[in-house]
Structures are given as structure tokens and as C-alpha cells.
Image (spheres, grey):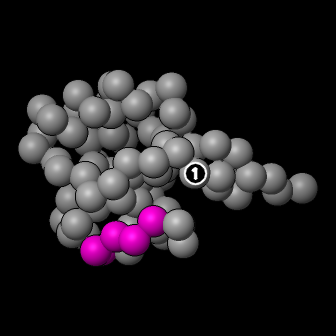
Amino acid sequence: MRRKIDKLVIAFHTTADAMKMESICKKESVGERLIPVPREISAGCGMAWCADPADRDRIEVLMQDNQIDPQEMRICKILV
């Protein structure tokens, strides 16, 4: 049975930023996958990166090092 758990959700202004984030995170083995933006977040491109909340600090460093400006970062209940 699927359940909802807390995940770090990072929304982006553009699809290019979302795709860049996916590429970097897969290369660095951090985070999980791109998901549709949850209803409680509004984002320009409609895509968000989903990750374990424990990876937040590492992800923030990766975004800063790669000039990725998130539109929003929030902990959300995600169906897994």
C-alpha cells in the first residue's frame, strides 16, 4: 500500500533548471527524482526535485555551486 512520507521538494522557475538539477543530483547520487509540483507549492515550470530531507544541506551546496536558483524549497508529504 502506498503511503505519504515527508520529502524535501524543490521547485524551479524553469524547466532548464529542473533538468540541470536532475543531472547534477544523479551524478552526485543525491535525491530521488523529478516529480510534478505538489498542489501546496506553485512553481513556474511545474516540475520539482524530490529528496530525503536529510540531504538538504548537501543539495543546497550543489545548487549554489552550479548556479541553480530554486523557486521554493519545502518539506511536503509525498505519496511513495
Using the rendered view, name the quadrant where residue 1 is placed.
bottom right
Residue 21, horizontal then vertical, whole percent:
27, 49
Residue 69, horizontal then vertical, whole percent:
17, 50
Tell me: 49 left or right of 60.
Answer: right
At x 53% / y 35%, what residue is drawn? 52
Q: Is residue 19 visible?
A: no
For residue 58, above or below residue 3 = above
Q: Is residue 7 found inside the magenta-colored segment of the image?
A: no
Tell me: 38 left or right of 48.
Answer: right
- The overriding secondary structure of the stretch rendered in magenta is loop
For residue 66, above or below residue 73 = above
Q: Amino acid at mark 1?
A: Cys
Residue 58, horizontal then vertical, whole percent:
33, 25
**Magenta-drawn segment:** 41-45
Total numbered labels: 1
Q: Is residue 71 visible?
A: yes
At x 64% / y 55%, what residue is drawn? 78
Q: Element at badge 1?
A: strand
Tell me: 66 left or right of 23.
Answer: left
At x 40% / y 60%, what residue is drawn? 48
**25 or 3: nearer the viewer:** 3
At x 54% / y 72%, what residue is drawn? 39
**68 or 30: nearer the viewer:** 68
Residue 45, horizontal then vertical, whole percent:
30, 74
Tell me: 40 left or right of 63.
Answer: right
